[in-house]
Image (tube, rainbow, N blue to C red):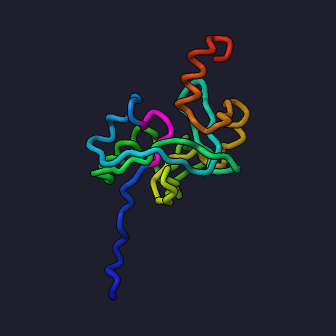
Amino acid sequence: MTSTGKQKMIDCLFAYGPLMPGFIHFPLLGEVGAVEPARCTGQLFHLDYRWPVLLDAGEGTVQGQLIKLRYPRDVLKTIDDLKGFTEYDPATLDDLRIVKDVQTAAGDTVQAYCYVFPAERAEFVKRVGRLIEDGSWQRFLVAREYLGSAQK
């Protein structure tokens, strides 16, 4: 078998924040295919001035959705613009797009694009962010709403 040198583009996105269905940025994904619950390793933090951030480190589990993208190139460009992602200087960026192994509810492992906070800025996140212990931003928001302003 001969290789053409072309790699198949990954067509899945792991969303753990406002890119999930029902949240503000989901419509940016356009027409999508299957959406299913999934998880990956890492630590999820809530920063009060913005959305959740994922640190690609630690022993934790982050809960989210695996989304099959119909037009991955276009969608990734849109999300990259939204998140201010460029591939050049991770020390100054808020989000990096990486390929990460994600586990589906059925137990399958799938490679998906995922936006993570740069490791170079992890100490900042740990200092100002709130660790979401169970890794679910959706549950965090529900609990925060019901617990009232003392927990905000």
Q: Is residue 7 above or below residue 31?
A: below
Q: Is residue 8 above or below residue 2?
A: above
Residue 5 percent coordinates (x, y): 35, 78
Residue 40 percent coordinates (x, y): 57, 50
Q: Quadrant of the N terminus?
A: bottom left
Q: Residue furthest front?
A: 106
Q: Which residue is nearer to you in this view: 12 or 92?
A: 12
Q: Quadrant of the C terminus?
A: top right
Side of 137 relative to 110 (left or right): right
User: Residue drawn at (55%, 42%), measured in percent from left and top?
Assistant: 63
User: Residue drawn at (52%, 30%), measured in percent from left and top?
Assistant: 138
User: Residue drawn at (50%, 50%), measured in percent from left and top?
Assistant: 105
Q: Total of numbered circles in the picture?
A: 0
Residue 106 at least partly seen: yes
**Would residue 70 be counted in the magenta stretch?**
no
Q: Point out the stretch of residues depicted in magenta.
A: 14-20
